[in-house]
Amino acid sequence: MNGVWPVLLTLGDKLAAHVLLSASALALGIAVALPLAVWASRNAAVARVALGFASLVQTIPALALLALFFPVLLSLRAVFGEGLPTLGFLPALLALALYALLPILRNAVTARAEMDAGVLDAADAVGMTRSQKLRLVEAPLAAPYVMAGIRTAAVWTIGAATLSTTVGQPSLGDPIFAGLQTQDWSLVLAGCIASAGLALAADGLLALVERGLKTRRPALAWTGAALIALGLVAALVPGRGGDTRDTVVIGAKNFSEQYILARVIGDRLERAGYAVTYREGLGSAVIHNALTSGAIDVYVDYSGTVWANEMKRTGTPPRTEMLRQIAAWEAANGARMLGALGFENAYAFAMKSEPARAEGIASLGDLAAKGRGLVLGGDLEFFRRPEWRAVDAAYGLGALRQRNFAPTFMYDALASGEADVITAFSSDGRIAADRLVVLADPKGALPAYDAMLLVAPARANDRRFVGALTPLVGAIPVETMREANFMVDRTVDKKSPDEAARWLASRIGR
């Protein structure tokens, strides 16, 4: 808890990005919802369709809605060109604007339906045109109700904007997701406090505007509007006078090793003269497409992941042959596999040593024969991955009960008895620290997972860029990577990914 305040003081750029994203999404939602509400108030069929669509959007989890815009925007590049962003601000803006629609639309339609019929008849009786009636009668009467809808939409949008981290948009979700993955609760609390504070501030200022409209006190409404405008201007300030150096975007998935390696890469590129930004917390399903589409410039992936998920291969060739074929495949797609870093982070099945010894389980074959009824914990994507299908086909592990856990809680699930076996990673420091048994894979069902540097097409022939990163190839032994990971993952004397990255860089020494 003592570390929350120092973290809060470092969140200025995340707060500014969060404010601009939320305000833009809310503004887009208002721009779509209000004309639609006017149309819906005059046509019952339009009202049913519009409210039904807005309600349907609310049933889609925000995380899924954000992710779904990636393939949608990727397909739209055929129409709008390769410059159309597929990650970052645009998909986050579109998803959040859809989320903001319902409360504004519903309140506006309800306000119009509940208006005094006598007032509307009087407007007709004095000969007002439709536009005069809307501007002078309907809009003023509906304004307080619409503002109430906007307040609700603002709070929803600010809360959901924390999820935009998963599509590479900087936000207050960055410290929350990073803290969850590394079990750094100061980061989680700082992100939550900042997000909640922002939502309360926005709601309070919008309430001023609402009260001014309801009580016919323009000064109060203008005061609220002016303070909101002041906040937006303040959020724009950090973006002025930005770094004029060539900016590269480093991608990372959502676990400690990726955070550490991203910073090792970033440090080398900064020393080579580049400005660096990070897109962290990206899922395996989007990060490779983000590289080939140019949304990120470099990241670390694993040979088995690219082999199975991207190349759709099913065999398990020797490591060097797999790396050779991956390099050729990446080159054919315009990207570049710069080389393997020197360590492997393979999927592994791990158990606590006592029950493994008691049950006589030392291999996946033993687990299939003696593990009926045991709980197998996998990360959020494992049971959908081809690696699981390959292992299940080779050993027949279908009798095990499956449970999903976030990677950061996998070892805690094993320690607490929520899982009997977990899918670990061979470079995890906690395997040795927790004295776990890694089950042997005598049939070789799991492919190799050499960590590899992948470079985007636009940087593939950038000699300065490639020259800065080439010394990392073959430079990181698995023992060193495991120790760096454990610095971040342990609960005592815990280090941040930045600190672990500096330690790792000092050990690499190139």
Image: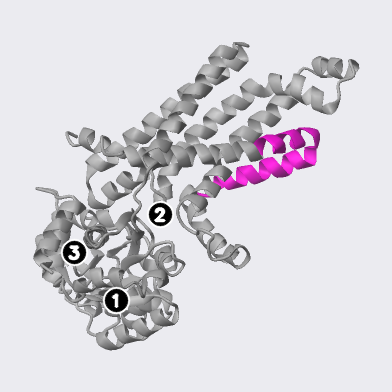
Pointer 2: what residue? 168
* Front residue of 144 and 403: 144
Q: Earlier in the sequence, mark 2 or mark 3?
A: 2
Whole-number angstrom distance, CA of label 2 to CA of label 3:
25 Å
User: Helix, strand, or loop for circle 2?
Assistant: loop
Q: Quadrant of residue 488?
A: bottom left
Pointer 3: what residue? 428
Residue 217 vs 384, above or below: the answer is above
Q: Position of residue 337 (x, y in %)?
A: 33, 77
Q: Amino acid at mark 1?
A: Leu
Q: Position of residue 339 (x, y in %)?
A: 26, 77
* Front residue of 430 and 435: 430
Is 35 one of the magenta-colored residues? yes
User: Which stretch appears magenta?
Assistant: 33-61
Residue 106 vs 468, above or below: the answer is above
In the image, which is nearer the foreground, mark 3 or mark 1?
Answer: 1
Query: Along the horizontal axis of the image, is 129 left or right of 227?
Result: right
In the image, which is nearer the foreground, mark 2 or mark 3?
Answer: 2
The overriding secondary structure of the stretch rendered in magenta is helix
Is 295 one of the magenta-colored residues? no
Note whether residue 347 is visible.
no
* Front residue of 109 and 342: 342
For the C terminus, the quadrant is bottom left
Q: Position of residue 100 (x, y in %)?
A: 56, 39
Q: Position of residue 457 (x, y in %)?
A: 41, 72
Q: Amino acid at mark 3?
A: Asp
Q: Quadrant of residue 129?
A: top right
Query: Along the horizontal axis of the image, is 59 left or right of 168?
Result: right
Which numbered dot is residue 169? none
